[in-house]
Amino acid sequence: MLLGALEGGGTKMVCAIGEEDGSIIDRITIPTRSPDETMPHIIDYFKEKMACALGIGFFGPLDLNPSSGTFGHLTATNKQDWQNYDVMGVLKNALNVPCRIDTDVNAAALGEAAYGCMRKLKNGIYITVGTGIGVGVIANGSVVHGMVHPEGGHVIVRRHPDDDFPGDCIFHKDCLEGLAAGPAIAARMHCKGQDLPADSPVWEWVSYYLAQAICDYIYILSPEKIVLGGGVMQQTQLYPMIRKHVLELLNGYVESDQIRDIDHYIVPATLNDNQAVMGCLKLAYDAALLS
Amino acid sequence: MLLGALEGGGTKMVCAIGEEDGSIIDRITIPTRSPDETMPHIIDYFKEKMACALGIGFFGPLDLNPSSGTFGHLTATNKQDWQNYDVMGVLKNALNVPCRIDTDVNAAALGEAAYGCMRKLKNGIYITVGTGIGVGVIANGSVVHGMVHPEGGHVIVRRHPDDDFPGDCIFHKDCLEGLAAGPAIAARMHCKGQDLPADSPVWEWVSYYLAQAICDYIYILSPEKIVLGGGVMQQTQLYPMIRKHVLELLNGYVESDQIRDIDHYIVPATLNDNQAVMGCLKLAYDAALLS
Protein backbone atom coordinates (compact mmCIF):
# COMPACT_ATOMS: atom_id res chain seq x y z
CA MET A 1 0.00 0.00 0.00
CA LEU A 2 1.69 3.22 -1.14
CA LEU A 3 0.74 6.14 1.09
CA GLY A 4 1.06 9.81 0.20
CA ALA A 5 2.29 12.46 2.64
CA LEU A 6 2.10 16.22 2.13
CA GLU A 7 3.88 18.46 4.63
CA GLY A 8 2.66 21.89 3.60
CA GLY A 9 4.80 24.66 5.03
CA GLY A 10 4.86 28.40 4.48
CA THR A 11 8.06 28.27 2.42
CA LYS A 12 8.09 24.75 1.00
CA MET A 13 5.85 21.76 0.35
CA VAL A 14 7.30 18.31 0.95
CA CYS A 15 5.53 15.56 -1.00
CA ALA A 16 6.48 12.00 -0.17
CA ILE A 17 5.47 8.41 -0.76
CA GLY A 18 5.92 5.84 1.96
CA GLU A 19 4.56 2.87 3.79
CA GLU A 20 2.55 2.18 6.91
CA ASP A 21 5.70 1.53 8.98
CA GLY A 22 6.69 5.16 8.37
CA SER A 23 9.39 4.36 5.80
CA ILE A 24 9.78 7.02 3.11
CA ILE A 25 10.31 5.68 -0.43
CA ASP A 26 10.44 8.89 -2.42
CA ARG A 27 10.13 12.62 -1.85
CA ILE A 28 10.22 15.94 -3.65
CA THR A 29 10.24 19.51 -2.37
CA ILE A 30 8.32 22.31 -4.08
CA PRO A 31 8.60 25.99 -3.11
CA THR A 32 5.33 27.37 -1.68
CA ARG A 33 3.97 29.97 -4.12
CA SER A 34 0.30 30.75 -4.80
CA PRO A 35 -2.17 27.84 -4.81
CA ASP A 36 -2.50 28.08 -8.62
CA GLU A 37 1.25 27.74 -9.06
CA THR A 38 1.83 25.16 -6.33
CA MET A 39 -1.09 22.75 -6.19
CA PRO A 40 -0.84 21.32 -9.75
CA HIS A 41 2.71 20.09 -9.01
CA ILE A 42 1.55 18.44 -5.83
CA ILE A 43 -1.41 16.77 -7.53
CA ASP A 44 0.74 15.55 -10.44
CA TYR A 45 3.23 14.01 -8.04
CA PHE A 46 0.71 11.99 -6.07
CA LYS A 47 -1.14 10.93 -9.26
CA GLU A 48 2.05 9.74 -10.89
CA LYS A 49 3.11 7.85 -7.75
CA MET A 50 -0.38 6.32 -7.46
CA ALA A 51 -0.79 7.06 -3.74
CA CYS A 52 -3.81 5.14 -2.45
CA ALA A 53 -4.44 7.59 0.42
CA LEU A 54 -3.10 11.00 1.43
CA GLY A 55 -2.16 12.47 4.81
CA ILE A 56 -1.83 16.26 4.92
CA GLY A 57 0.00 18.27 7.58
CA PHE A 58 -0.50 21.91 6.62
CA PHE A 59 0.40 25.35 7.93
CA GLY A 60 -2.52 27.11 9.58
CA PRO A 61 -4.77 28.34 10.82
CA LEU A 62 -6.93 25.52 9.48
CA ASP A 63 -10.58 24.72 10.09
CA LEU A 64 -10.38 21.23 11.60
CA ASN A 65 -13.94 21.00 12.91
CA PRO A 66 -15.36 17.94 11.09
CA SER A 67 -18.89 19.29 11.34
CA SER A 68 -17.98 22.67 9.80
CA GLY A 69 -18.91 23.53 6.20
CA THR A 70 -15.35 24.73 5.67
CA PHE A 71 -13.58 21.71 7.20
CA GLY A 72 -10.08 21.36 5.77
CA HIS A 73 -9.91 24.98 4.58
CA LEU A 74 -7.27 27.47 5.59
CA THR A 75 -8.83 30.36 7.52
CA ALA A 76 -7.30 33.79 8.28
CA THR A 77 -3.68 33.07 7.32
CA ASN A 78 -1.47 36.08 6.65
CA LYS A 79 -0.58 34.48 3.29
CA GLN A 80 -3.14 36.38 1.17
CA ASP A 81 -3.19 33.90 -1.73
CA TRP A 82 -4.06 31.05 0.59
CA GLN A 83 -6.80 32.69 2.64
CA ASN A 84 -9.85 30.41 2.90
CA TYR A 85 -8.27 27.97 0.45
CA ASP A 86 -9.89 24.50 0.49
CA VAL A 87 -6.70 22.42 0.85
CA MET A 88 -8.46 19.17 1.73
CA GLY A 89 -11.29 19.48 -0.86
CA VAL A 90 -9.01 20.35 -3.77
CA LEU A 91 -6.68 17.42 -3.09
CA LYS A 92 -9.48 14.96 -2.38
CA ASN A 93 -11.31 15.86 -5.60
CA ALA A 94 -8.20 15.81 -7.76
CA LEU A 95 -6.79 12.55 -6.40
CA ASN A 96 -10.02 10.74 -5.53
CA VAL A 97 -8.39 8.87 -2.62
CA PRO A 98 -9.14 8.95 1.14
CA CYS A 99 -7.50 11.97 2.79
CA ARG A 100 -6.87 13.20 6.32
CA ILE A 101 -5.66 16.63 7.33
CA ASP A 102 -4.15 18.15 10.46
CA THR A 103 -1.85 21.04 11.32
CA ASP A 104 1.84 20.64 10.49
CA VAL A 105 2.79 20.59 14.18
CA ASN A 106 0.12 18.03 15.02
CA ALA A 107 1.44 15.89 12.15
CA ALA A 108 4.93 16.11 13.67
CA ALA A 109 3.57 15.15 17.11
CA LEU A 110 1.75 12.22 15.50
CA GLY A 111 4.94 11.17 13.70
CA GLU A 112 6.85 11.01 16.99
CA ALA A 113 3.89 9.23 18.63
CA ALA A 114 3.53 6.65 15.86
CA TYR A 115 7.16 6.00 14.90
CA GLY A 116 9.46 8.00 17.18
CA CYS A 117 10.28 8.58 20.81
CA MET A 118 6.66 8.99 21.97
CA ARG A 119 5.69 5.52 20.75
CA LYS A 120 3.39 3.70 23.22
CA LEU A 121 2.99 6.85 25.35
CA LYS A 122 -0.51 8.11 26.05
CA ASN A 123 0.50 11.69 26.81
CA GLY A 124 3.23 13.73 25.19
CA ILE A 125 4.14 17.15 23.86
CA TYR A 126 5.88 18.09 20.60
CA ILE A 127 7.21 21.65 20.38
CA THR A 128 8.57 23.20 17.21
CA VAL A 129 10.62 26.37 17.62
CA GLY A 130 11.24 28.05 14.28
CA THR A 131 9.65 31.05 12.54
CA GLY A 132 6.84 30.51 15.06
CA ILE A 133 6.37 28.22 18.05
CA GLY A 134 3.87 25.42 17.64
CA VAL A 135 2.82 22.75 20.10
CA GLY A 136 1.25 19.39 19.28
CA VAL A 137 -0.43 17.69 22.22
CA ILE A 138 -1.04 13.96 22.61
CA ALA A 139 -3.48 13.23 25.45
CA ASN A 140 -5.16 9.95 26.28
CA GLY A 141 -3.50 8.42 23.24
CA SER A 142 -4.68 10.87 20.55
CA VAL A 143 -3.79 14.27 19.15
CA VAL A 144 -5.80 17.01 20.90
CA HIS A 145 -7.89 19.24 18.63
CA GLY A 146 -10.31 20.86 21.05
CA MET A 147 -12.37 23.98 20.47
CA VAL A 148 -10.10 25.26 17.67
CA HIS A 149 -6.64 23.82 17.87
CA PRO A 150 -4.09 24.30 20.61
CA GLU A 151 -1.74 27.24 20.20
CA GLY A 152 0.64 26.43 23.01
CA GLY A 153 3.34 28.69 21.55
CA HIS A 154 1.51 31.72 22.89
CA VAL A 155 1.60 30.92 26.62
CA ILE A 156 2.35 33.72 29.06
CA VAL A 157 5.90 33.79 30.43
CA ARG A 158 7.78 35.97 32.87
CA ARG A 159 10.42 38.30 31.49
CA HIS A 160 14.07 37.55 32.09
CA PRO A 161 15.43 40.55 34.02
CA ASP A 162 18.34 41.12 31.59
CA ASP A 163 16.25 40.88 28.40
CA ASP A 164 14.74 44.19 27.33
CA PHE A 165 13.44 43.08 23.92
CA PRO A 166 9.75 44.07 23.87
CA GLY A 167 8.65 40.96 21.98
CA ASP A 168 7.25 40.76 18.45
CA CYS A 169 4.05 38.69 18.60
CA ILE A 170 1.49 40.81 16.77
CA PHE A 171 -1.22 39.68 19.20
CA HIS A 172 0.59 39.47 22.54
CA LYS A 173 3.97 41.17 22.09
CA ASP A 174 5.95 39.21 24.71
CA CYS A 175 4.28 35.79 24.86
CA LEU A 176 6.57 32.76 24.42
CA GLU A 177 6.54 33.01 20.61
CA GLY A 178 7.10 36.77 20.71
CA LEU A 179 10.25 36.27 22.80
CA ALA A 180 11.74 32.92 21.78
CA ALA A 181 10.92 32.17 18.11
CA GLY A 182 13.51 32.65 15.37
CA PRO A 183 12.36 36.14 14.28
CA ALA A 184 12.46 37.41 17.89
CA ILE A 185 16.02 36.13 18.24
CA ALA A 186 17.04 37.78 14.97
CA ALA A 187 15.31 41.09 15.75
CA ARG A 188 16.93 41.25 19.17
CA MET A 189 20.45 40.40 18.08
CA HIS A 190 20.38 41.95 14.57
CA CYS A 191 21.50 38.67 13.03
CA LYS A 192 20.14 35.20 12.51
CA GLY A 193 20.26 32.78 15.42
CA GLN A 194 22.39 30.33 13.45
CA ASP A 195 25.12 32.99 13.15
CA LEU A 196 25.28 33.73 16.89
CA PRO A 197 27.88 32.14 19.18
CA ALA A 198 26.71 29.35 21.49
CA ASP A 199 27.48 31.56 24.50
CA SER A 200 25.39 34.52 23.34
CA PRO A 201 23.16 35.74 26.22
CA VAL A 202 20.11 35.28 23.98
CA TRP A 203 20.28 31.49 24.47
CA GLU A 204 20.00 31.96 28.23
CA TRP A 205 16.85 34.05 27.73
CA VAL A 206 15.35 31.72 25.10
CA SER A 207 16.00 28.65 27.27
CA TYR A 208 14.44 30.40 30.28
CA TYR A 209 11.27 31.20 28.32
CA LEU A 210 11.01 27.72 26.80
CA ALA A 211 11.56 26.18 30.24
CA GLN A 212 8.67 28.20 31.69
CA ALA A 213 6.38 27.00 28.92
CA ILE A 214 7.54 23.41 29.44
CA CYS A 215 6.80 23.70 33.18
CA ASP A 216 3.30 24.90 32.34
CA TYR A 217 2.82 21.96 29.95
CA ILE A 218 4.02 19.61 32.72
CA TYR A 219 1.68 21.15 35.30
CA ILE A 220 -1.34 21.09 32.98
CA LEU A 221 -0.89 17.81 31.10
CA SER A 222 1.72 15.73 32.93
CA PRO A 223 3.20 14.49 29.62
CA GLU A 224 5.41 11.43 29.63
CA LYS A 225 7.85 12.96 27.13
CA ILE A 226 8.62 16.43 25.76
CA VAL A 227 10.09 16.53 22.27
CA LEU A 228 11.57 19.62 20.62
CA GLY A 229 12.16 20.30 16.95
CA GLY A 230 12.42 23.19 14.48
CA GLY A 231 15.28 25.38 13.33
CA VAL A 232 16.01 27.12 16.64
CA MET A 233 16.35 23.75 18.41
CA GLN A 234 19.32 22.89 16.19
CA GLN A 235 21.20 25.03 18.70
CA THR A 236 22.05 21.97 20.77
CA GLN A 237 23.45 24.05 23.65
CA LEU A 238 19.79 24.90 24.43
CA TYR A 239 18.90 21.42 25.70
CA PRO A 240 20.99 21.36 28.89
CA MET A 241 20.05 25.00 29.56
CA ILE A 242 16.32 24.26 29.21
CA ARG A 243 16.58 21.17 31.43
CA LYS A 244 18.41 23.12 34.14
CA HIS A 245 15.80 25.90 34.14
CA VAL A 246 12.94 23.37 34.20
CA LEU A 247 14.38 21.65 37.28
CA GLU A 248 14.95 24.99 39.01
CA LEU A 249 11.42 26.20 38.23
CA LEU A 250 9.70 22.94 39.27
CA ASN A 251 11.79 23.11 42.46
CA GLY A 252 11.10 19.50 43.39
CA TYR A 253 7.33 19.81 43.10
CA VAL A 254 6.71 17.19 40.40
CA GLU A 255 8.46 13.94 41.25
CA SER A 256 8.64 11.05 38.80
CA ASP A 257 11.15 8.67 37.28
CA GLN A 258 10.92 10.69 34.08
CA ILE A 259 11.81 14.00 35.77
CA ARG A 260 14.70 12.33 37.62
CA ASP A 261 16.01 11.21 34.20
CA ILE A 262 15.45 14.58 32.57
CA ASP A 263 18.03 14.01 29.79
CA HIS A 264 15.62 11.41 28.39
CA TYR A 265 12.49 13.41 29.24
CA ILE A 266 13.15 16.68 27.39
CA VAL A 267 14.67 15.54 24.12
CA PRO A 268 15.30 16.52 20.50
CA ALA A 269 13.01 15.03 17.84
CA THR A 270 14.21 11.57 16.88
CA LEU A 271 13.07 11.22 13.28
CA ASN A 272 15.72 13.27 11.44
CA ASP A 273 13.34 16.10 10.64
CA ASN A 274 10.97 13.60 9.00
CA GLN A 275 8.54 13.68 11.93
CA ALA A 276 5.87 15.69 10.11
CA VAL A 277 6.15 13.69 6.86
CA MET A 278 5.96 10.45 8.86
CA GLY A 279 2.95 11.78 10.78
CA CYS A 280 1.33 12.44 7.40
CA LEU A 281 2.00 8.81 6.43
CA LYS A 282 0.17 7.80 9.63
CA LEU A 283 -2.73 10.11 8.72
CA ALA A 284 -2.83 8.52 5.25
CA TYR A 285 -2.80 5.05 6.74
CA ASP A 286 -5.67 5.94 9.09
CA ALA A 287 -7.58 7.45 6.15
CA ALA A 288 -7.08 4.27 4.11
CA LEU A 289 -8.19 2.05 7.00
CA LEU A 290 -11.35 4.05 7.61
CA SER A 291 -12.34 4.39 3.95
CA MET B 1 -27.89 -0.67 41.33
CA LEU B 2 -26.84 1.33 44.42
CA LEU B 3 -23.50 3.02 43.89
CA GLY B 4 -21.21 4.35 46.61
CA ALA B 5 -19.35 7.65 46.38
CA LEU B 6 -16.57 8.83 48.69
CA GLU B 7 -15.32 12.41 48.33
CA GLY B 8 -12.31 12.40 50.63
CA GLY B 9 -11.17 15.90 51.50
CA GLY B 10 -8.58 17.22 53.91
CA THR B 11 -11.19 18.49 56.38
CA LYS B 12 -14.22 16.27 55.70
CA MET B 13 -15.25 13.01 54.07
CA VAL B 14 -18.53 12.95 52.16
CA CYS B 15 -20.03 9.45 51.83
CA ALA B 16 -23.01 9.10 49.54
CA ILE B 17 -25.21 6.53 47.86
CA GLY B 18 -26.66 7.20 44.44
CA GLU B 19 -27.52 5.90 41.04
CA GLU B 20 -25.95 5.75 37.61
CA ASP B 21 -27.79 8.90 36.44
CA GLY B 22 -25.88 10.84 39.12
CA SER B 23 -28.83 11.18 41.51
CA ILE B 24 -27.81 11.16 45.18
CA ILE B 25 -30.10 9.15 47.47
CA ASP B 26 -28.35 9.55 50.82
CA ARG B 27 -25.26 11.21 52.22
CA ILE B 28 -23.33 11.71 55.43
CA THR B 29 -20.34 13.90 56.26
CA ILE B 30 -17.55 12.76 58.58
CA PRO B 31 -14.71 15.02 59.79
CA THR B 32 -11.30 13.93 58.48
CA ARG B 33 -9.21 12.73 61.42
CA SER B 34 -6.55 10.01 61.37
CA PRO B 35 -7.21 6.94 59.19
CA ASP B 36 -7.84 4.81 62.31
CA GLU B 37 -10.54 7.20 63.51
CA THR B 38 -12.06 7.97 60.12
CA MET B 39 -12.01 4.86 57.96
CA PRO B 40 -14.20 2.58 60.15
CA HIS B 41 -17.10 5.07 59.88
CA ILE B 42 -16.74 5.19 56.11
CA ILE B 43 -16.62 1.42 55.81
CA ASP B 44 -19.64 0.97 58.12
CA TYR B 45 -21.67 3.44 56.05
CA PHE B 46 -21.08 1.74 52.71
CA LYS B 47 -21.58 -1.75 54.22
CA GLU B 48 -24.88 -0.75 55.79
CA LYS B 49 -26.08 0.88 52.56
CA MET B 50 -24.99 -2.16 50.57
CA ALA B 51 -23.18 -0.23 47.85
CA CYS B 52 -22.41 -2.61 44.98
CA ALA B 53 -19.43 -0.54 43.78
CA LEU B 54 -17.43 2.41 45.10
CA GLY B 55 -16.01 5.50 43.41
CA ILE B 56 -13.37 7.39 45.39
CA GLY B 57 -12.27 10.98 44.80
CA PHE B 58 -9.52 11.64 47.33
CA PHE B 59 -7.15 14.43 48.30
CA GLY B 60 -3.64 13.88 47.09
CA PRO B 61 -1.00 13.38 46.11
CA LEU B 62 -2.12 9.88 45.14
CA ASP B 63 -0.32 7.15 43.24
CA LEU B 64 -2.62 6.61 40.25
CA ASN B 65 -0.26 4.57 38.10
CA PRO B 66 -2.16 1.29 37.58
CA SER B 67 1.08 -0.65 37.13
CA SER B 68 2.59 0.65 40.38
CA GLY B 69 2.84 -1.55 43.47
CA THR B 70 1.40 1.32 45.51
CA PHE B 71 -1.51 2.15 43.18
CA GLY B 72 -4.30 3.87 45.10
CA HIS B 73 -2.04 4.88 48.00
CA LEU B 74 -1.53 8.41 49.22
CA THR B 75 2.11 9.48 48.73
CA ALA B 76 3.90 12.47 50.31
CA THR B 77 0.89 14.35 51.71
CA ASN B 78 1.58 16.91 54.42
CA LYS B 79 -1.06 15.12 56.56
CA GLN B 80 1.34 12.93 58.55
CA ASP B 81 -1.26 10.33 59.60
CA TRP B 82 -2.22 9.70 56.00
CA GLN B 83 1.26 9.42 54.45
CA ASN B 84 1.51 6.36 52.21
CA TYR B 85 -1.95 5.20 53.35
CA ASP B 86 -3.51 2.57 51.05
CA VAL B 87 -6.91 4.25 50.56
CA MET B 88 -7.99 2.03 47.67
CA GLY B 89 -6.74 -1.27 49.14
CA VAL B 90 -8.28 -0.74 52.58
CA LEU B 91 -11.70 0.10 51.14
CA LYS B 92 -11.62 -2.63 48.50
CA ASN B 93 -10.69 -5.29 51.06
CA ALA B 94 -13.24 -4.15 53.64
CA LEU B 95 -16.16 -3.77 51.20
CA ASN B 96 -15.27 -6.46 48.68
CA VAL B 97 -16.88 -4.53 45.81
CA PRO B 98 -15.35 -3.08 42.62
CA CYS B 99 -13.65 0.27 43.31
CA ARG B 100 -12.16 3.09 41.26
CA ILE B 101 -10.09 5.97 42.58
CA ASP B 102 -9.03 9.36 41.27
CA THR B 103 -8.07 12.73 42.73
CA ASP B 104 -10.87 14.87 44.18
CA VAL B 105 -10.48 17.48 41.46
CA ASN B 106 -10.50 14.85 38.71
CA ALA B 107 -13.69 13.44 40.26
CA ALA B 108 -15.25 16.91 40.11
CA ALA B 109 -14.19 17.30 36.46
CA LEU B 110 -15.68 13.88 35.73
CA GLY B 111 -18.92 14.86 37.49
CA GLU B 112 -19.31 17.93 35.28
CA ALA B 113 -18.37 15.85 32.22
CA ALA B 114 -20.82 13.06 33.00
CA TYR B 115 -23.78 14.98 34.43
CA GLY B 116 -23.08 18.72 34.27
CA CYS B 117 -22.15 21.45 31.86
CA MET B 118 -19.31 19.54 30.17
CA ARG B 119 -21.62 16.71 29.06
CA LYS B 120 -20.90 15.55 25.51
CA LEU B 121 -17.74 17.69 25.33
CA LYS B 122 -14.47 16.00 24.43
CA ASN B 123 -12.21 18.64 25.97
CA GLY B 124 -12.81 20.67 29.10
CA ILE B 125 -11.19 22.09 32.22
CA TYR B 126 -12.46 22.08 35.80
CA ILE B 127 -10.66 24.43 38.21
CA THR B 128 -11.22 24.44 41.95
CA VAL B 129 -10.01 27.50 43.85
CA GLY B 130 -10.07 26.90 47.58
CA THR B 131 -7.34 26.11 50.10
CA GLY B 132 -5.34 25.12 47.02
CA ILE B 133 -5.93 25.35 43.29
CA GLY B 134 -6.59 22.10 41.49
CA VAL B 135 -7.26 21.50 37.82
CA GLY B 136 -9.01 18.48 36.29
CA VAL B 137 -8.44 18.07 32.57
CA ILE B 138 -10.74 16.26 30.14
CA ALA B 139 -9.01 15.64 26.79
CA ASN B 140 -10.18 13.46 23.94
CA GLY B 141 -13.18 12.44 26.06
CA SER B 142 -11.36 11.18 29.18
CA VAL B 143 -9.77 12.53 32.34
CA VAL B 144 -6.03 13.11 31.81
CA HIS B 145 -3.72 11.32 34.23
CA GLY B 146 -0.38 11.47 32.46
CA MET B 147 3.04 10.94 34.01
CA VAL B 148 1.83 11.69 37.56
CA HIS B 149 -1.31 13.76 37.58
CA PRO B 150 -1.76 17.28 36.31
CA GLU B 151 -1.12 20.05 38.81
CA GLY B 152 -2.40 22.97 36.77
CA GLY B 153 -2.77 25.13 39.87
CA HIS B 154 0.97 25.73 39.88
CA VAL B 155 1.34 27.42 36.47
CA ILE B 156 3.64 30.42 36.18
CA VAL B 157 1.89 33.80 36.08
CA ARG B 158 3.03 37.39 35.75
CA ARG B 159 2.75 39.60 38.79
CA HIS B 160 0.11 42.30 38.93
CA PRO B 161 2.07 45.58 39.31
CA ASP B 162 0.04 46.71 42.36
CA ASP B 163 0.27 43.40 44.24
CA ASP B 164 3.35 43.13 46.45
CA PHE B 165 2.39 39.89 48.25
CA PRO B 166 5.38 37.55 47.81
CA GLY B 167 3.22 34.42 47.40
CA ASP B 168 2.95 31.46 49.75
CA CYS B 169 3.42 28.30 47.68
CA ILE B 170 6.06 26.33 49.56
CA PHE B 171 7.55 25.11 46.26
CA HIS B 172 7.18 28.12 43.95
CA LYS B 173 6.26 31.10 46.15
CA ASP B 174 4.31 33.13 43.55
CA CYS B 175 2.83 30.54 41.18
CA LEU B 176 -0.94 30.73 40.58
CA GLU B 177 -1.77 28.83 43.78
CA GLY B 178 0.70 30.87 45.82
CA LEU B 179 -1.03 34.09 44.74
CA ALA B 180 -4.70 33.25 44.21
CA ALA B 181 -5.76 30.40 46.54
CA GLY B 182 -7.73 31.10 49.71
CA PRO B 183 -4.74 31.15 52.12
CA ALA B 184 -2.87 33.63 49.89
CA ILE B 185 -5.91 35.94 49.89
CA ALA B 186 -6.20 35.67 53.68
CA ALA B 187 -2.46 36.18 54.32
CA ARG B 188 -2.40 39.25 52.07
CA MET B 189 -5.50 40.94 53.49
CA HIS B 190 -5.24 39.69 57.09
CA CYS B 191 -8.79 38.34 56.97
CA LYS B 192 -10.68 35.59 55.17
CA GLY B 193 -11.77 36.21 51.60
CA GLN B 194 -15.41 35.73 52.50
CA ASP B 195 -15.19 38.71 54.88
CA LEU B 196 -13.71 41.09 52.29
CA PRO B 197 -15.85 43.54 50.31
CA ALA B 198 -16.59 42.70 46.66
CA ASP B 199 -14.59 45.77 45.58
CA SER B 200 -11.43 44.86 47.51
CA PRO B 201 -8.40 45.24 45.22
CA VAL B 202 -7.48 41.61 45.95
CA TRP B 203 -10.25 40.39 43.62
CA GLU B 204 -8.72 42.35 40.77
CA TRP B 205 -5.38 40.63 41.40
CA VAL B 206 -6.90 37.17 41.89
CA SER B 207 -8.99 37.50 38.71
CA TYR B 208 -5.91 38.64 36.76
CA TYR B 209 -3.91 35.60 37.90
CA LEU B 210 -6.76 33.15 37.24
CA ALA B 211 -7.29 34.72 33.80
CA GLN B 212 -3.64 34.19 32.90
CA ALA B 213 -3.88 30.53 33.88
CA ILE B 214 -7.10 30.16 31.89
CA CYS B 215 -5.41 31.70 28.83
CA ASP B 216 -2.60 29.16 29.18
CA TYR B 217 -5.15 26.32 29.45
CA ILE B 218 -6.88 27.67 26.31
CA TYR B 219 -3.59 27.93 24.39
CA ILE B 220 -2.41 24.47 25.41
CA LEU B 221 -5.65 22.44 25.34
CA SER B 222 -8.28 24.45 23.49
CA PRO B 223 -11.02 23.30 25.92
CA GLU B 224 -14.66 23.66 24.90
CA LYS B 225 -15.68 24.81 28.39
CA ILE B 226 -13.94 26.10 31.51
CA VAL B 227 -15.73 25.41 34.80
CA LEU B 228 -14.79 26.95 38.14
CA GLY B 229 -15.64 25.75 41.64
CA GLY B 230 -14.34 25.84 45.20
CA GLY B 231 -14.80 28.30 48.05
CA VAL B 232 -13.04 31.30 46.50
CA MET B 233 -15.27 31.06 43.41
CA GLN B 234 -18.33 31.74 45.55
CA GLN B 235 -17.21 35.36 45.16
CA THR B 236 -19.43 35.78 42.11
CA GLN B 237 -17.95 39.18 41.26
CA LEU B 238 -14.87 37.26 40.08
CA TYR B 239 -16.55 35.78 36.99
CA PRO B 240 -17.00 38.98 34.94
CA MET B 241 -13.55 40.16 36.05
CA ILE B 242 -11.91 36.92 34.94
CA ARG B 243 -13.74 36.95 31.59
CA LYS B 244 -12.68 40.56 30.93
CA HIS B 245 -9.02 39.78 31.68
CA VAL B 246 -9.13 36.64 29.52
CA LEU B 247 -10.43 38.59 26.51
CA GLU B 248 -7.83 41.31 27.04
CA LEU B 249 -5.01 38.79 27.33
CA LEU B 250 -6.08 36.70 24.31
CA ASN B 251 -6.36 40.00 22.40
CA GLY B 252 -8.36 38.47 19.56
CA TYR B 253 -5.91 35.65 18.93
CA VAL B 254 -8.21 32.66 19.58
CA GLU B 255 -11.48 33.05 17.67
CA SER B 256 -14.39 30.69 18.18
CA ASP B 257 -18.12 30.76 18.85
CA GLN B 258 -17.33 29.76 22.43
CA ILE B 259 -14.96 32.69 23.04
CA ARG B 260 -17.46 35.09 21.46
CA ASP B 261 -20.04 33.82 23.99
CA ILE B 262 -17.64 33.96 26.93
CA ASP B 263 -20.39 34.18 29.59
CA HIS B 264 -21.23 30.57 28.68
CA TYR B 265 -17.62 29.54 28.19
CA ILE B 266 -16.09 30.43 31.57
CA VAL B 267 -18.76 29.37 34.04
CA PRO B 268 -19.40 28.35 37.65
CA ALA B 269 -19.83 24.64 38.39
CA THR B 270 -23.40 23.58 37.68
CA LEU B 271 -23.95 20.71 40.10
CA ASN B 272 -24.55 22.57 43.39
CA ASP B 273 -21.20 21.56 44.85
CA ASN B 274 -22.08 17.90 44.20
CA GLN B 275 -19.73 17.66 41.20
CA ALA B 276 -17.10 15.57 43.01
CA VAL B 277 -19.65 13.24 44.66
CA MET B 278 -21.38 12.78 41.31
CA GLY B 279 -18.04 12.12 39.63
CA CYS B 280 -17.47 9.41 42.25
CA LEU B 281 -20.84 7.87 41.31
CA LYS B 282 -19.60 7.78 37.71
CA LEU B 283 -16.35 6.14 38.86
CA ALA B 284 -18.41 3.57 40.81
CA TYR B 285 -20.60 2.90 37.78
CA ASP B 286 -17.53 2.39 35.56
CA ALA B 287 -16.04 0.08 38.21
CA ALA B 288 -19.27 -1.96 38.33
CA LEU B 289 -19.45 -2.18 34.53
CA LEU B 290 -15.86 -3.37 34.20
CA SER B 291 -15.98 -5.86 37.07
Image (cartoon, coloured by chain):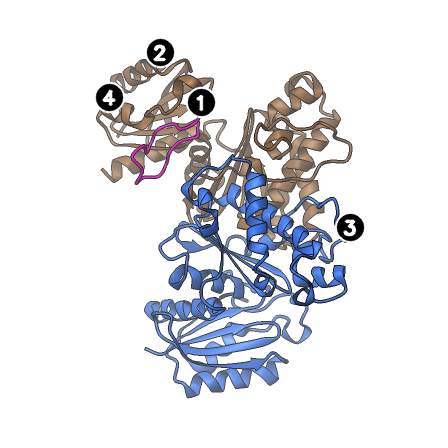
Chain colours: A brown, B blue
What residue does disc 2 label?
A37
Label 1 close to label 4 by CB (< 8 Å):
no
Q: Do callouts 3 and 1 point to residues on the same chain?
A: no
Q: What residue type is disc 4 on?
A: Ala
Q: CA distance from mark 2 to mark 3?
A: 58 Å
- Label 4 packing within 10 angstroms: few (<14), some (14-19), many (20+): few
The answer to if B66 sits in the magenta stretch is no
Residue displayed at 66% across by 76% down: B81
From this view, report whether residue A110 is shown above or below residue B133. Answer: above
What residue does disc 3 label?
B164
Lateral position of residue A141 relative to residue B250, left or right: left
From this view, report whether residue A52 is shown above or below residue B188. Answer: above
Mark 1 or 4, nearer chain start: 1
Q: Which mark is residue A9?
A: 1
Q: CA distance from mark 2 to mark 1?
A: 15 Å
Residue displayed at 46% across by 37% down: B255
Give the structural element (helix, strand or loop) at label 4: helix
From this view, report whether residue B69 is shown above or below residue A152. Answer: below
Toward the top, the furthest residue is A37
Q: Position of residue A51 (x, y in %)?
A: 27, 25
Q: What residue type is disc 1 on?
A: Gly
Mark 2 or 1, nearer chain start: 1
Query: Which segment is the magenta one?
Result: A60-79
| Nearest the eye: A158 or A100 | A158
Q: What residue type is disc 3 on?
A: Asp
Identify the image quadrant of residue A83.
Answer: top left
Q: Do callouts 4 and 2 point to residues on the same chain?
A: yes
Q: CA distance from mark 1 to mark 4?
A: 20 Å
What residue does disc 4 label?
A94
